[in-house]
Image (tube, rainbow, N blue to C red):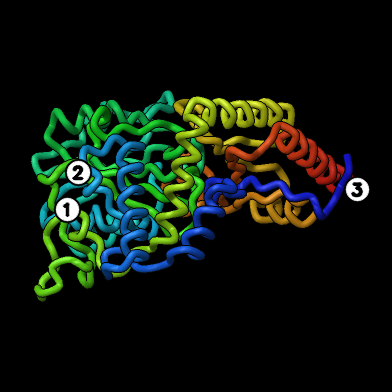
Amino acid sequence: MAESKQMRVYLDNSATSWPKPPQVIEAITRFLTDCGASPGRSGHRMAISAAREVFETRELVAKLFNVPNSDRVIFTSNATHSLNIALKGVLQKGDHVITTTFEHNSAIRPLRELEAKGIIEVSVIGCNSSGYFDLEVLKSSIKPNTRLVASIHASNVSGDVLPIEQIGEICKSHNLLFLVDASQSAGIIPVDMQTHNIDMLAFTGHKKLYGPTGIGGLCVANNHILLQPLIQGGTGSQSESEFHPDFYPDRLEAGTLNTVGIVGLKAGVDFILGKGFDNIQAHIQLLTLRFVKGLKTISTIDVQRTAMGSLRVGVVSLNLQGYSPSDLAFALDSEYGIMIRPGLHCAPLAHRALGTFPQGSARFSFGCFNTIAEVDYTLEVLRKLNERKKNTQRS
């Protein structure tokens, strides 16, 4: 096996996907070169062109997630921004929220802040003894003041995919709002807001939708969900009023939009739809299963995932005996050009549930552009690092 510091294997796609499809780079460059104006702020041709790009992206995202009305596709800076808008915009004094042990800090931290201020109650539920998300505990946790269930779709730590269709059915039958964080699933697993009874869906563009960083969104199912704005300001609409507009999407979009990011997101979604969910999922499934099968031949590796995961989002977290997650990540990068993410992955509750708190784990995450050769190379390197550690311990 050739060892080369110049070799570059990017396995951190759950943080940010790389590389981006050529059409994403081309779309961003073309917009900055030919347009670059602010949408909805002027009547000249470049502003109109920018507004058209924004509108077409709303329509495309609405198609992707089956949002009933594209006006309820709200553009944000990322999923964290979206989740804060959703949680702080809909929850009121005395509300009870049910969430899961799989959540990212982008959901847990705003919930804990609201809880610490005495505004809401929070219940956190996890898996049953078989390792499956406990739907029965979810049902039994519902109180008269329960207002909302907040659930991640796919764990960024273990790759587990939660049963959002069943959770949505429970929410609908109990007249509860259902908020889904699709940061890790959007672009790999089809998400249908209407079929899955999702009231609010948060997503980010820079992961499996292959857009740039700094763009995300919040999709709201219907006009009956009137979220309070997180911020107020310029919208380009109703400029004569000193009060913020109360209609979607302007209600939740204040200030100049990240039009460059929106254009890149549009190209990323076009790429996903053109390639096809089945093809993307099959490729990532192939890589992930090959990786996990290879890991089983290394007895000193412990893979962190529960029985419920189907590995469809390409996330595998592990610990190699004798290495801390950060030491392993450093060795992989500095010696072999393999880039991963160590630590707690902004999901301490998940690591507590998996028994890997506080040290965390080393996360390997695959994307569209990874190859079988990269998987095999990574497995060979892990075997070599394992043997090195064994030899060091013997001497």
Horizontally, residue 124 falls left or right of residue 146, namely: right
Residue nearest the observer in this picture, 267 or 103: 267
Residue nearest the observer in this picture, 375 or 332: 375
Question: Residue shown at 26%/27% (left/top)?
Answer: 195
Q: In the rendered structure, are the residues bearing label 1 and label 2 in contact, judged by CB atoms less than 8 Å apart?
A: yes
Q: Where is residue 137 in the image (x, y as percent from the top left)?
A: 26, 31
Q: Name the residue under label 2.
A: 148
Give the number of the mark in front: 1 or 2: 1
Q: Where is residue 287 in the image (x, y as percent from the top left)?
A: 63, 30
Amino acid at circle 1: Val
Determine the residue located farthest toward the right in the rendered image.
395
Q: Name the residue under label 1.
A: 90
* Label placed on residue 395: 3
Question: Residue shown at 40%/55% (left/top)?
Answer: 262
Amino acid at circle 3: Ser
Residue nearest the observer in this picture, 345 or 12: 12
If you read the primary sequence from the N terminus, does the residue marked by circle 1 or circle 2 appear first? Answer: 1
Residue 51 position by quadrant: bottom left
> Could you tell me how far apart the alpha carbons at marks 3 and 1 are, in whole angstroms?
61 Å
Amino acid at circle 2: Leu
Question: Residue shown at 26%/67% (left/top)?
Answer: 43
- Which class describes the residues within 10 Å of circle 3: few (<14), some (14-19), or many (20+)? few
Q: In this view, does 190 lie above or below 257?
A: above
Secondary structure found at label 2: strand
> Could you tell me how far apart the alpha carbons at marks 1 and 2 are, in whole angstroms?
9 Å
Question: Residue shown at 39%/31% (left/top)?
Answer: 190
Q: Can residue 17 be seen in this view?
A: yes
Q: Where is residue 33 in the image (x, y as percent from the top left)?
A: 51, 65
Q: Quadrant of the N terminus?
A: top right
Q: Can residue 358 be seen in this view?
A: no
Secondary structure found at label 3: loop
If you read the primary sequence from the N terminus, does the residue marked by circle 3 or circle 1 appear first? Answer: 1
